[in-house]
Amino acid sequence: MRLVVGVDGSESSLRAVDWAADNAALRRTPLRLVYASLWERYEGASLGRNAERPSEQVMAEDIVETAERRAHRRQPDVHVSTDVLPEEPEQALVRESHSALAVVLGHRGRSGMTEAILGSVGVTVAEHAHCPVVVLRCGDDDQVRPGTPGRIVLGVDEKPAGSAALRFAAEEAGLRGIPLEAVHVSRHGVTGTLLRSGERESDAAPALDEALRDVPIGLEVLRRTVSGRPRDALLAASRDAALLVVGARRRPGHFGPQLGRVAHGVLHHAACPVAVVPELS
């Protein structure tokens, strides 16, 4: 298994390379850098008339070579491979996710249209990937290393015990040697009293205990219960976190959008990298 990074030459994608290289070093796993574009749709017809390689292909190869050099400078001992794929980025990265530990993406693409780029690639990959998807927003600190102050924040929902999101968050915290903070949000106090069916405000602490029952022994765990909107609570927690982890419930056989409003909100507005972890329901 390996970490896969989608690269496009933007500064954001190069920060994603840095983050993934550090993570690959922690996990002692290979790193794969992928550039995907349908360049042959627009330039392939010229191949018969011109023996030279299409300009988009030349650019793509330069992009992955630059990213490869950066990864080697960042983590010389990590094995790095590259590929240029003539297909839509979303399709290529979802397919890559079948054999990946995680797919890592930058938030801002070459066009500079941050919301459009995230909407067209990052969200689509997060909705359909078969592994965790980590998105680094513009301005994320790319210097997160073992021992760096911070914590891994996990958003705890109504089906937390044994969840893939919990396992991923606990592993990240253990690898980095930093605490795991589990945040359970009750809607009590927002527009009157609004709690999940059968939940009392006093149930929040037991719910966290149930969620964290399988956390590895020795991992420092912080439990926090807050009232309010889950999206707002997690965005607040992201301000001094190394990584925010949320689960995404998947509906087998459903091919439409697979992310809820909370996951959408933190992907677009979190102050730290966000990991969306698929959960089959």
Image: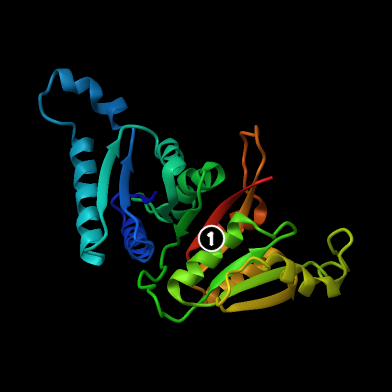
87 is higher (above) or lower (below) than 229:
above
Find numbered disc 1 in the image and state the secondary structure of the residue it sits on.
Answer: helix
From the viewer's side, name the closer residue of 173 and 229.
Answer: 173
Quadrant of the drawing holding the C terminus: top right
101 is higher (above) or lower (below) than 54:
below
| 187 horizontally vs 273: left or right | right
User: In the image, residue 172 lies at what x, y percent?
Assistant: 48, 66
Circle 1 Cα neighbour tier, 10 Å, few/some/many (<14 / 14–19 / ≥20): many
Q: Amino acid at mark 1?
A: Phe
Which colour assignment does the render follow? rainbow
Residue occupying the point 85% across, 73% down: 201
Residue occupying the point 35% across, 60% down: 24
* Residue at the far left in the pictured view: 51
| 80 horizontally vs 193: left or right | left
Q: Quadrant of residue 268?
A: bottom right
Label 1 sits on residue = 168
User: In the image, residue 196 lies at what x, y percent?
Assistant: 83, 60
* Residue at the far front in the pictured view: 217
Q: Is residue 269 visible?
A: no
Residue occupying the point 27% across, 39% down: 84
Q: Quadrant of residue 70?
A: bottom left
User: In the image, residue 199 lies at what x, y percent?
Assistant: 86, 65
Label count reads 1
Q: Is residue 216 visible?
A: yes
| 244 horizontally vs 29: left or right | right
69 is higher (above) or lower (below) than 181:
above
